[in-house]
Amino acid sequence: MMAGSNGRTNWVAIWISAAVVVVLVVIGVLVVWMNNQATSGGDAPQAGNIDAETGAISIGDGDDVLSEYLDFMCPVCNQFHQVYGDTIRGLIDDGSITFDIHPIAILDAKSQGTEYSTRAANAMYCVAEESEDAVLPFYDLLFENQPQETTPGLTDEQLIEFAGQAGAEGAADCITDGTHSRFVSMITEKTPVPEGAGGIGTPTVLLNGEFLQLTGDPEADLVGRLAG
């Protein structure tokens, strides 16, 4: 038994030691909690058409899966939409494919501090939660009204307006609050990277999990591959 110089147990020293242990435990718990918060996906969107693990917003029910990873400020993504969009919609409508949209954010630095890429991706998830039928119309509207790089991008009010036009009026608060912004950041880090690419790029397009080398010919790149 620990004793003081007068032979009595030094309870003050024991209490201080115990208090230090308690403080260290609390600090340890806080560190773990903060690390979990930093690496968690925040509020994952909840809807039957959204895969909270991969971030895919699924449209259609075909056996073949076409996946597009896109940033709504990316001009090349808009070019992909213009060249391949009608073909993709036709393949969705005839039941050939499931189209998985993965909105990500790699161009926040191009929007003068407004983090437009994250805000637009968040808005896409908000719309998908609110209405499955509004997903493609909203997707189309964001590309039809795509801001140029190095501009502030669309405002939250404009995103809400387009969400309403697409049929997802109830997504307003989710858009304003940035409800899924941290989820967007987490999902962005999961974007697949082709061998030798050196980093995430958009659009990244896969068919049944295999990277597509796009030639600008939708018939050859999509229809022909599905037929084969």
Image (cartoon, helix red, strand yellow):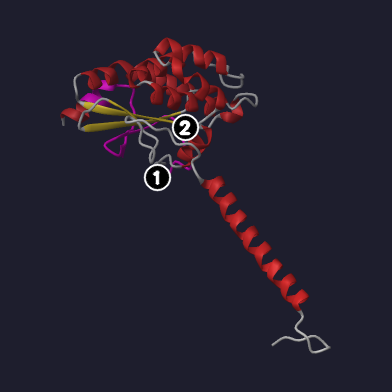
Q: Is residue 154 visible?
A: no
On the image, which quarter does residue 110 sit in?
top right
> Along the line of sight, which residue is nearer the eye, 25 or 151?
25
Total tally of numbered discs in the picture: 2
| Spot occupied by residue 22 in the image (x, y as percentages of width and height) | 66, 64
Quadrant placement of the C terminus: top left
N-terminal of the pair, mark 2 or mark 1, is 2
Q: Give the labeled residue for mark 1.
A: 195
| Spot occupied by residue 86 in the image (x, y as percentages of width and height) | 30, 15
* Residue occupying the far front of the picture: 8
Q: Give the labeled residue for mark 2.
A: 104
**Identity, as a three-letter code, of the amino acid under mark 1:** Glu
User: Any magenta on residue 54?
Assistant: no
* Residue occupying the far left of the picture: 228
* Residue occupying the far right of the picture: 6
| Helix, strand or loop for disc 1 | loop
Q: Is residue 5 above or below residue 200?
A: below
Q: Is residue 159 above or below residue 206?
A: above
| Helix, strand or loop for disc 2 | loop
| Spot occupied by residue 10 in the image (x, y as percentages of width and height) | 77, 80
**Identity, as a three-letter code, of the amino acid under mark 2:** Ile
On the image, which quarter does residue 64 sit in?
top left
Q: Mark 2 or mark 1: which is in front?
A: 2
| Spot occupied by residue 179 in the image (x, y as percentages of width and height) | 52, 30
- Residue shown at 47% from the left, 32% from the top: 104
Q: Which residues are magenta?
A: 195-223
* Residue occupying the far top of the picture: 165
- Residue shown at 61% from the left, 30% from the top: 109
Q: Is residue 120 left or right of residue 51?
A: right
Q: Is residue 66 left or right of residue 199?
A: left
- At label 2, counting other C-alpha atoms closer than 10 Å, the crowd grade (few under 14, some 14-19, many 20 or more) is many
Q: Is residue 104 left or right of residue 111?
A: left
